[in-house]
Amino acid sequence: MDPIINLILFSCLAVVMVLLSLLAITTKSLLRSATYLLLVLVCTAGLYLFLNYHFLAAVQISVYAGGVLILFIFAIFLTSQKGEILQKHEMKKYLYGALVFVAGIAVTAFAFIKHGFLYSPDNTTMLGDQEINMKVIGQALMGTEKYQYLLPFEVLSVLLLACIIGGILIARKR
Amino acid sequence: MFFIGIFGFIVRKNMIAILISLELILNAVEINFAVFNRYLYPEHMDGMFFTLFGIAITAAETAVALAIIINAYRSIGNIDVNNMNKMKL
């Protein structure tokens, strides 16, 4: 793809993502916040597609947008009272948050400028070259050699089992 | 301005919908894994698998956190963080 089009696409995605995430934390209604979160996650999947991680984009949409968001919406419906809106921030807390925000932005910007990660044309030409195919992913996920990931995979499955049991145990009726 | 916009939303965490912001933060971290993997080492897949496992762990964590929240709502009646010290009783 043309680097200019690439850049424009990426900028659109990034700007939309930042705006939506800002909206997601500033909006008053919790359900609206969850909707903005959904849009942010879909934009993230678009970003993965943009980086040619097609598998990652599919996982992102199905797990996040499909699973996590449904959980969120269920929880919001189960816990919200009628006509409830979020309370306003206290001014002091708001100030601390803004301070942390500005400091973090400054640190990351400093790191970026110092290491010269900012946009350069030869960096984008690497993009859009190869797509990792499913066979490679599957073999890497199931292998036991170096750079292969069977052990984390199994640990993750045990973690998910523990989460299922823990969730049932916590949320069951007494 | 490469992906400073992505870094931008890691750092803000001053909000009431704490879990939603947690999702945003984890999402940003995962984007960073994937993007750095693609730009610095396009021939490896380590960052991609980190992202994959990160997504799964996030899903698990969200499920447990929401179970706790629903349980707390059932016993207290609202889900404000300031009231959570009633759980000690």
Image (cartoon, coloured by chain):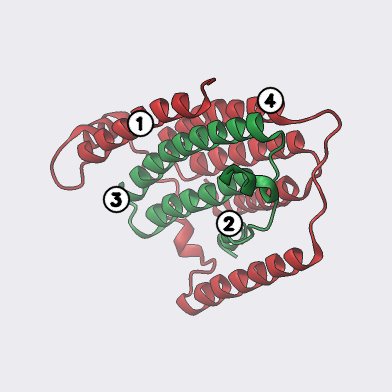
Chain colours: A red, B green
Q: Which residue is mark 2?
A: B6
Residue B15, horizontal then vertical, whole percent: 69, 53
Task: Tell me the amino acid under the disc marked 4.
Answer: Leu
Q: Nearer the viewer, mark 1 or mark 2?
A: 1
Task: Give me the residue at 20% from left, 47% from top.
Answer: A147
Q: Nearer the viewer, mark 1 or mark 3?
A: 1
* Residues at marks 2 and 4, CA–CA distance in whole angstroms: 32 Å
Q: Chain of mark 1?
A: A
Figure check: B43 above or below A78: below
Residue that lies at the very extreme toward the top in this rendered image: A173
Crowdedness near tag 4: few (<14), some (14–19) or many (≥20) residues, C-alpha within 10 Å: few
Q: Secondary structure at mark 1?
A: helix
Say if residue A16 shows up in the picture. Answer: no
* Residues at marks 2 and 3, CA–CA distance in whole angstroms: 23 Å
Q: Chain of mark 4?
A: A
Figure check: A95 above or below B64: below
